[in-house]
Image (spheres, grey):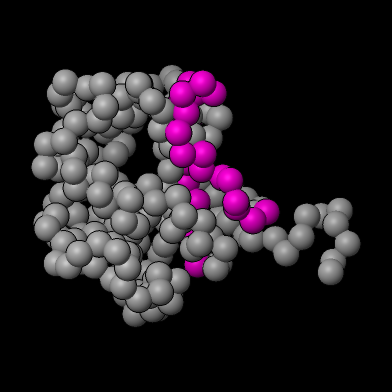
């Protein structure tokens, strides 16, 4: 059976990106990059918006405000190009042009449920906030991991990660500090029917 990981990098205030900020908020260091290079091979799950963004980077499109990719960003895009990717979308045209990408038009929840039951190895989301939220709500996520970067992007933050989430209890399974400034926390998530002090319906 496959294991499903929801994996985010965020600002301290829970944004996935920020206008005018480079990838990794420009704060990735050697310990963090080495750890990324040690991660097991995964099949990546994403939605249409993430596919459009990341496949655009793979063909040379630059983030707004950047003249070129930094080496760390370029390496990250190259590694993702080589990885197996499953893209859930009813709007993207087929076939997908980004290497190693498979388009799935079926319901994402049922498709991932079947992939978990019949597969082996690691499934991991990348970006795709609504997909990750739906997988969590469906109780399909085995591991929930966040690496928090030491910035608050209250004025420029984009893509608030946790809006619309259910209440979730998190049991910590791992934590680590990279380069003296980045904080990894990993949990086993458990969706709550109601908060502890609420009266059950």
Is residue 96 left or right of 176 when viewed as pictured?
Answer: left
Residue depicted at x 11% and y 42%: 59
Is residue 162 left or right of 47 when viewed as pictured?
Answer: right
Residue depicted at x 73% and y 64%: 193
Residue depicted at x 15% and y 23%: 68
Q: Taking the image as drawn, is residue 116 in sight?
A: no
Is residue 127 left or right of 55 when viewed as pictured?
Answer: right
In the picture shown, does residue 160 fall above or below 113? above
Prevailing secondary structure of the magenta residues: loop
Asked if residue 129 lies in the magenta stretch, the reply is no
Residue depicted at x 19% and y 47%: 55
In the picture shown, does residue 35 fall above or below 190? above
Q: Which residues are magenta?
A: 140-167
Question: Which quarter of the figure is the C terminus placed in?
Answer: bottom right
Residue 1: image location, x then y, percent: 38, 74
Residue 164: image location, x then y, percent: 60, 51
């Amino acid at each position: 059976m496959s294991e499903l990981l929801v994996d985010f990098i965020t600002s301290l205030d829970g944004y996935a990106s920020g206008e005018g900020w480079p990838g990794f908020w420009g704060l990735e260091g050697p310990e963090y990059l080495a750890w990324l290079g040690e991660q097991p091979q995964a099949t990546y799950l994403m939605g249409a918006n993430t596919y459009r963004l990341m496949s655009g980077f793979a063909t040379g499109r630059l983030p707004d405000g950047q003249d070129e990719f930094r080496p760390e960003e370029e390496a990250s895009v190259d590694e993702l190009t080589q990885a197996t990717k499953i893209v859930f979308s009813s709007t993207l045209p087929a076939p997908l042009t980004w290497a190693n990408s498979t388009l799935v038009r079926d319901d994402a929840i049922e498709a991932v449920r079947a992939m978990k039951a019949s597969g082996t190895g690691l499934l991991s989301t990348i970006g795709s906030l609504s997909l990750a939220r739906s997988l969590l709500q469906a109780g399909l996520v085995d591991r929930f991991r966040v690496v928090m970067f030491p910035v608050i992007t209250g004025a420029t933050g984009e893509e608030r990660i946790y809006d619309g989430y259910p209440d979730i209890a998190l049991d910590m399974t791992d934590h680590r500090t990279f380069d003296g400034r980045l904080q990894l926390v990993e949990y086993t998530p458990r969706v709550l029917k109601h908060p502890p002090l609420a009266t059950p319906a």
